[in-house]
């Protein structure tokens, strides 16, 4: 398995994998539970630059010439700038009152979403991607990584805690309460 920065040509493969991790949130953005519309929404932004879902903010894991996992990550300090194109698009096409909460802020690189192709789930791909990010961002660059985990997903929370993430509070995103976890150079256990 190889992990690399995503390229624009990966967009069509990235969209359905990222959607696995954020389906409910995208449905709330577009105000309908329609898989094709949600995938098109994500594809629209993944293939563009300078927004939070852009391929520029993704790493892909690949094996046998296939993308098997994707992670979307960006500097929390950039959220407002990266989110503006999303907000404008949602307001003009789906929901004029759209006003999502800020799920991150300056001081962390935010793992927005992580998805693994269903054919490869349960094989440690997500763990390998997270270890890659911890090495890249925390160990080498001395940044803090943050993410949100749903209380309805205890297996994901257990994985994050086992990798060294620690709870730093709660956040709300599109009306859903989530636990905020972080790992930083000072909390990294060797």
Image (spheres, rainbow, N blue to C red):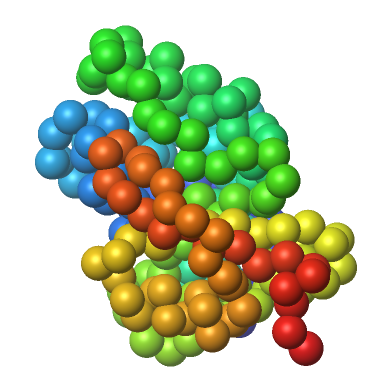
Which residue lies at the image location 59% right of the left edge and 81% below the top edge?
A: 163
Which residue lies at the image location 56% right of the left edge and 42% below the top edge?
A: 104
Residue in front for this viewpoint, 24 or 18: 24
x and y percent of residue 156 in the render? 39, 74
Residue in front for this viewpoint, 175 or 70: 175
Which residue lies at the image location 50% right of the left edge and 21% below the top edge?
A: 85
Corner quadrant of residue 140:
bottom right
Residue in front for this viewpoint, 3 or 128: 128
Up the image or down, 114 lies above or below 156; here it is: above
x and y percent of residue 124 in the render? 48, 86
Up the image or down, 127 lies above or below 148; here it is: below
Q: How many marks?
A: 0
Decide if residue 106 is on the left or right side of residue 95. right
Decide if residue 171 is on the left or right side of residue 108. left
x and y percent of residue 169 in the render? 49, 56
x and y percent of residue 119 in the render? 33, 79
Decide if residue 106 is on the left or right side of residue 38. right
Asked whether the viewer can see residue 181, the reply is yes
């Amino acid at each position: 398995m190889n992990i690399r920065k995503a390229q624009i040509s990966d967009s069509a493969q990235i969209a359905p994998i990222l959607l696995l991790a954020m389906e409910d949130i995208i449905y709330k953005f577009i105000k309908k539970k329609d898989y094709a519309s949600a995938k098109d929404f994500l594809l629209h932004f993944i293939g563009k630059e300078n927004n939070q879902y852009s391929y520029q903010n993704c790493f892909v894991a690949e094996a046998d010439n296939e993308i098997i996992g994707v992670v979307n990550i960006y500097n929390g300090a950039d959220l407002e700038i990266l989110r503006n194109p999303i907000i404008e698009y949602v307001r003009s096409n789906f929901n004029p009152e759209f006003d999502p909460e800020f799920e991150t802020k300056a001081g962390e690189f935010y793992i927005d979403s992580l998805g693994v192709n269903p054919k490869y789930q349960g094989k440690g791909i997500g763990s390998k991607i997270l270890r890659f990010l911890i090495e890249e961002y925390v160990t080498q660059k001395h940044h803090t990584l943050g993410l949100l985990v749903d209380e309805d997903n205890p297996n994901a929370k257990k994985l994050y805690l086992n990798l060294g993430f620690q709870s730093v509070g709660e956040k709300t995103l599109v009306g859903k309460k989530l636990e905020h976890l972080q790992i930083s150079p000072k909390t990294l256990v060797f």
